[in-house]
Image: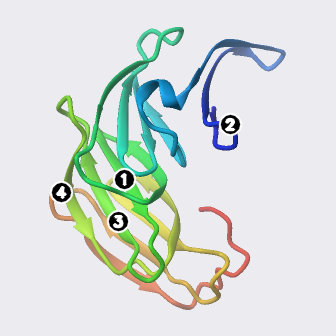
Amino acid sequence: VNDTAWQRLYVFHIAGPSSTQLVTSTEWSVYGFSDAADMAVEGNTLVVVGAKAHKFDISDPVNPRYVASSAQNLNANAVKIQGGYAYILDTNGADSKFFVVSLQNTTPTVVGTIGGMNSAAHLTVLDGRVAVLGNPFFVGQPLSIIDVKNPLNPVITMTSSTVETSQAHGI
């Protein structure tokens, strides 16, 4: 769990619906940052985004191990992981960007970018495609579908401005 107010990582063991136990809690500042906006997990890899993409090894959940941070500066608010790549939304108003970040080496590395995502705020990944939805506070922001089957060359395959996103808060 990412606590953005207190800037802490909480790790829980969930054995069942009635058996949830806190395993550990760590302040993000221990790892040299305090800007965690979102996080995602795939296997034993945790990615936390904010001003950069931060990679952790969580094979030992009691002791999450910081691995490295991306060289690319971000203003990220959303991340999803699939197939060894992190898909990240960088929020900067009309100049928002979509990043594909390789997690296959030690340091998270940007391998693909699309600009002009119009206040993108939400994303989901499924079968080599990423759906990106505009910020709900700006009426008329589009829904975009990005083909990431080749992560080095992400391509917008569909954009729909007919989706009313003023009340949409996720996809």
Which residue is tagged 4? 150
Residue 99 horizontal/vertical position (percent)? 30, 59
**Residue 109: % across, % down:** 20, 45
Please state which amino acid type lies under the numbered disc 1.
Tyr
Label 4 to label 1, Cα distance in Å?
A: 13 Å
Between discs 3 and 1, the one toward the N terminus: 1
Q: Earlier in the sequence, mark 3 or mark 2?
A: 2
Of callouts 2 and 4, the N-terminal one: 2
Question: In this figure, what is the number of numbered marks?
Answer: 4
Nearest the eye: 83 or 105: 105
Disc 3: which residue: 98
Which quarter shows the N terminus?
top right
Neighbor class of circle 4 (other Cα within 10 Å; few <14, some 14-19, many 20+) is few
Q: Secondary structure at mark 1?
A: strand
Query: Residue at image x 49%, y 60%?
Result: 123
Dot 2: element: loop
Q: Residue furthest right?
A: 18
Would you name the residue on which mark 2 appears? 6
Q: Comparing marks 2 and 1, which lies closer to the viewer?
A: 2
User: Which residue is the site of mark 1?
Assistant: 87
Tell me if 28 is positioned left or right of 68 in this view: right
